[in-house]
Image (tube, rainbow, N blue to C red):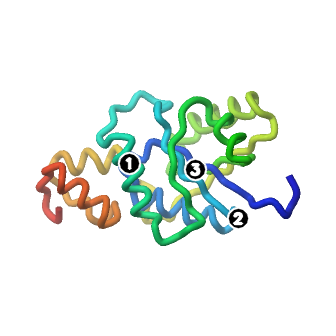
Amino acid sequence: MTRLDPMVAIYPGSFDPVTVGHEDIARRALRFADQVVVAVAHTPTQAKRSYFSLEERLEMLEEVFADDERIECTSFDGLLVDFARSRESRFVIRGLRAVSDFEYEFQMAQMNRELWNEFETMFLVPNVDFSFLSASLVREVARLGGDISSFVSPSVLRRFQAQGLEGEGL
C-alpha cells in the first residue's frame, strides 16, 4: 500500500442500536482515515440478544450517516481480519468508554494481530458526554419507558417509537 492509496478504517460492531457515541467515533475517525466502513457483524463476538434485525441496524446506520459519503455502512460475516483484507484496510477502530472495556478489546486486538500481523487496532476515547453510553443501556432505558432522545439520532428514535415504546420524550 502506498500513501496514494486511500486510508480505509473498519469500525465494526453490533450497533443495536447506533448511538450518538457510535456516531462520534465514526466521524472522528475521519480525521485520519479517508473512508470509514461501519460494519455490522452478522454474528456478535459477545453473547448478545439483538433488539433490531441486521437489516434494521443497517438501515439506521445508512440514515444516520447519509450526510457523509466517506462513511459506508455494510455488514460482514466471519473473521474481521478477512473482511478487512477484502476491503483493503489494515486497521480497525474501536471505542473505549471505560477501563472495563479495555481487557476485552485488548484481547481482540491481540488475536487479530495473530491472525494478520499487518492489522492494527486504533482505540478512540469517546467525547466525555458519551463516555457512559452503550447500546445495551439505551435498549434498557427504552424498554423501561425512559427518554432516550439525547442518546440516539432522530431517525433511530423513530425506530424505537415504531416498536411501540412509549417513554417520556419518545
Which residue matches tag 2? 32
> Residue 79: x percent and y percent?
62, 31
Q: CA distance from mark 3 to mark 2?
A: 13 Å
Q: Residues under labels 1 and 2: Cα distance?
A: 26 Å
* 136 shown above or below 33: above
Q: Residues within 10 Å of mark 1 (few under 14, many from 20)?
A: many
Image position of 13 (left or right of 164): right
Q: Residue at x 31, y 43 (%)?
A: 52
* Badge nearest the viewer, 3 or 1: 1
Q: Are circles 3 and 2 on residues that touch, CB within 8 Å? A: no
* Residue highlighted by disc 3: 11
- Residue at (74%, 44%) from the top-left corner? 120
CA gap, disc 3 and disc 1: 14 Å
Question: Which residue type carries mark 3?
Answer: Tyr
Residue positioned most to the bottom: 67
Answer with the quarter of the image where residue 156 lies.
bottom left
Image label count: 3
- For marks 3 and 1, the one nearer the N-term is 3
Q: Residue at x 18, y 49 (%)?
A: 163
For mark 1, give the secondary structure. Answer: helix
Q: Quadrant of the C terminus?
A: bottom left
Counting from the top left corner in percent of width and height, residue 152 is at 34, 61
The mark found on residue 57 in the picture is: 1
Please give the label number shown on residue 31.
none
Label 3: which secondary element: strand
Mark closest to the chain's N terminus, 1 or 2: 2
